[in-house]
Amino acid sequence: MKDLYKLIFELKSAKDIEKFFNEIFTDNEIETLSKRWRILKLLARNYTQREISNELNVSLCKVTRGSRILKDKNAIVTKYLIKEK
């Protein structure tokens, strides 16, 4: 995994990162990653877990996992989403 982290860090543009993701991940994996990110963004915007579950057609367990991440004030995702508001 460290090789992958290093490679992503070295990519120079969003276009290169997108191309890399499309080369290495399946369409289903990209869709799963996209949904996880959307869950986190909606939680950061104070949507309820049930609203997110219904809107994205995902289980409450997946939404709860995202909620736990956002409760961690040291999580990188939390810091990014708070800054984005």
Image: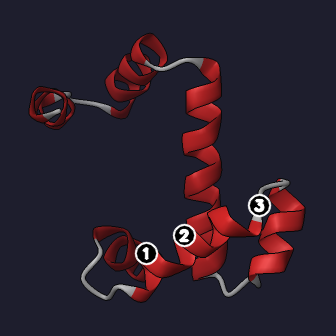
Q: Residue 72 location, x and y as percent? A: 35, 85
Helix, strand or loop at label 1? It is helix
For marks 1 and 3, the one nearer the N-term is: 3
Disc 3 to disc 2, C-alpha distance = 10 Å
Helix, strand or loop at label 3? It is loop
Q: Residue 26 location, x and y as percent? A: 55, 17
**x 19%, y 28%: residue:** 4
- Decide if residue 47 is in sight here: yes
| Residue type highlighted by circle 1 | Ile
Can you say whether 84 is above or below 30 in the image?
below
**x 81%, y 56%: residue:** 56
Disc 1 to disc 2, C-alpha distance = 7 Å
For marks 3 and 2, the one nearer the N-term is: 3
Q: Nearer the viewer, mark 1 or mark 3?
A: 3
Q: Where, quadrant-wise, is the N terminus in this rendering?
A: top left
Check if mark 1's residue and mark 2's residue have beta carbons within 8 Å: yes
Q: Residues within 10 Å of mark 3 (few under 14, many from 20)?
A: few
Q: Residues within 10 Å of mark 1 (few under 14, many from 20)?
A: some
Q: Which residue is mark 1?
A: 69
| Residue type highlighted by circle 3 | Ser
Give whichever of 64, 30 is nearer the camera: 64
